[in-house]
Image (cartoon, rainbow, N blue to C red):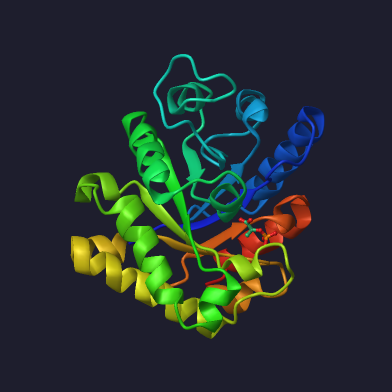
Amino acid sequence: MRKKIVAGNWKMNKTLQEGLELAKEVNSKVKANHAKEVTVVIGTPFIHLSEVSKVVDPDIVAISAQNCATEASGAYTGEVSAAMIASTGSRYVILGHSERRSYYGETDEILAKKVERALENNLEIIFCVGEVLAERENGKHFEVVESQLVNGLFNLTAEQFSHIVIAYEPVWAIGTGKTASSAQAEEMHAFIRKTIAGKYGQEVAEATSILYGGSCNPKNADELFSQPDVDGGLIGGASLKSDDFIAIVKARQNH
Ligand code: PEP
């Protein structure tokens, strides 16, 4: 059975003190509703990672970084390596977020290197894919997502691929308040699963968790999670308030 996952992406929000408060709140609220079948992850800024890992119970809330360097170590001023992330107790890293792709020029080739570094350091990867609005309007969304999967991930072995979680995040839905309909999400998630099956076989595809991201909130989470191929969510804005985030975790528990 594949994992059900609700992962928060705090992006560049919260000072260290605010982040610690939020992490403590999330930890205690998840603990109070603990349902082992949902994996809860919080993706914090780099500087929060080691402190946050001291205030959450790793069996209750897993910690994720939002990026890692392409290189293992050395003279790369300002970069943070996958080994450094792992050394804080973080278990996950989000790679390929559309904000990284568009604002920081992260290509599929760059992302493939980051994926390698993360796997070398035993991190689980939440790998984001998704089309921009013009690509959807031109009917290119399947093609775009397929090429992001093929170029970013399909050089991996099946064993390596078992450490990948996919997050389908239509760029037009991120931070816009415009959510993909549950039918649009399901259609793309089923396509992603079929594409994975074509490369790695049905068993691997069935075991891969595919999260939806893009203005997911306590009101629409239930409907999105009712879809058979939507295994959970990657949550931006709504992960910054513990009550909203927990409401989404509960929506995932209920299915
Ligand atoms: C995200 O950026 O990963 C995201 C899903 O953001 P939001 O929920 O704010 O749309």
Q: In this view, does 137 lie above or below 5?
A: below
Q: Which quadrant: the N terminus?
A: bottom left
At x 42%, y 32%, the residue is 70
Side of 245 where 252 appears, left or right = left
Q: Quadrant of residue 203?
A: bottom left
Q: Is residue 164 above or below residue 214?
A: above
Q: Residue 93: where, in percent of width, then height?
A: 49, 40
Q: Can residue 226 be seen in this view?
A: no
Q: Quadrant of residue 33?
A: bottom right
Residue nearer the viewer, 209 or 144 = 144
Q: Can residue 13 be seen in this view?
A: yes
| Numbered marks: total | 0
Q: Quadrant of ligand 1?
A: bottom right
Residue nearer the viewer, 55 or 204 = 204
At x 60%, y 77%, the residue is 180
Q: In which quarter of the image is residue 193?
A: bottom left
Q: Residue 90: where, in percent of width, then height?
A: 51, 32
Q: Residue 173: where, in percent of width, then height?
A: 64, 69
Q: In this view, does 57 lie above or below 197?
A: above
Side of 247 where 2 appears, left or right = left
Q: Is residue 249 above or below residue 78?
A: below
Q: Residue 133: where, in percent of width, then height?
A: 59, 74
At x 32%, y 30%, the residue is 120
Query: Extreme top residue here?
Result: 75
At x 47%, y 25%, the residue is 81
